[in-house]
Image: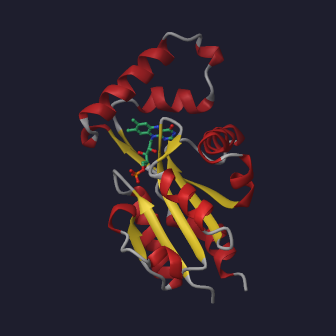
Amino acid sequence: MEKILIVYESRYGATRQYAQAIGRALGCPVYSRKELPAGQLESCSILVYGGGLYAGGVAGIRTLKQAMENYPQKEFVLFTCGVADPALPETVAAVRRGLEKALGAQALDRLHLFCLRGRLDYSQLSPLHRMMMAALCRMLKRKDPRSLAEEDRQILDTYGSRVDFVNLGTLTPLLSCLEQP
Ligand SMILES: Cc1cc2nc3c(=O)[nH]c(=O)nc-3n(C[C@H](O)[C@H](O)[C@H](O)COP(=O)(O)O)c2cc1C
C-alpha cells in the first residue's frame, strides 16, 4: 500500500476522533498538525488532512496548502468536520467555496474531498467562539426566516445546547478511496 500520513487540527475533538479512526483502520501514523515531527511529510506519498470548520474556513488549512505547493507529486485527501449536514448540497457547496478561496481552484481540483459531521457543545466553547456564535445567531435572527438556509436554521435551533453528529460509519467512502490499489 502507498505510504499514508494523517494530519489533523481539532479544537473540540471531533476531527481528532475521525483522524484516529482512519489511522486505526489503515494502520498509518496520525499526528495533530502542531505536533507533526519534521521530515514526516516528505516520506509519505498520500497526505490525509483533516480540519474542523470555523466560520466557513478549515482549521490549519495553510499546512495543506504549503504541502500541495511543495510536493506536487503527492496525492492529497482532505476531510472537513462541521455541524452543518453534508447530505445537503448547499453545505458541500459552502465548504468548496471556502476552499477555493483558501487554496485556489486548481488545488481544489487536485484534492479528494470528504465532508464529515462534528459536534458542538456550547458549554465547552472558548469565550471567543461563544461570542462568534452569539453574533452569528443575532445576525440570523434579524433575517427574514423564509430566506434562511437549512444550515442557518439548524444553527438557530441548536443554539446554546449540545449536538453530536459524529458518526465513524460515514468514513466508509474515504476509507474506500484510500484502500484502492
Ligand atoms: C466559532 C465557530 C464557528 C463554526 N463555524 C462552522 C461552519 O462554518 N460550518 C460548520 O459546518 N460548522 C461550524 N462550526 C462547528 C464546528 O465545525 C464543529 O464544532 C466541529 O466539530 C469542529 O471540529 P473539532 O471538534 O475537531 O474542533 C463552528 C463552530 C464554532 C465554535
Colouring of the image: secondary structure
Quarter for ligand 1? top left
In the picture, measured across the screen, residue 132 lies left or right of residue 74, that is left
- Residue at the farthest front position: 70
Q: Quadrant of the N terminus?
A: bottom right
100 over 27 or under it: above or below = above
Residue at 24% across / 33% down in the picture? Answer: 127
Q: Say if residue 148 shows up in the picture.
A: yes
- Residue at the farthest bottom position: 1
Q: How many marks?
A: 0
Q: Say if residue 117 shows up in the picture.
A: no
Quadrant housing residue 114: bottom right
Q: Position of residue 68 (x, y in %)?
A: 61, 62
Residue at 46% across / 73% down in the picture? Answer: 21
In the picture, measured across the screen, residue 2 lies left or right of residue 168, that is right
Residue at 68% across / 73% down in the picture? Answer: 73
Q: Position of residue 93 (x, y in %)?
A: 69, 40
Front residue of this view, candidates 9 and 138: 9
66 over 30 or under it: above or below = above
Residue at 57% across / 33% down in the picture? Answer: 151
Q: Quadrant of the C terminus?
A: bottom right
Q: Position of residue 40 (x, y in %)?
A: 45, 77
In the picture, measured across the screen, residue 13 lies left or right of residue 19, that is left
In the picture, measured across the screen, residue 179 lies left or right of residue 119, that is right
44 over 172 or under it: above or below = below
54 over 150 or under it: above or below = below
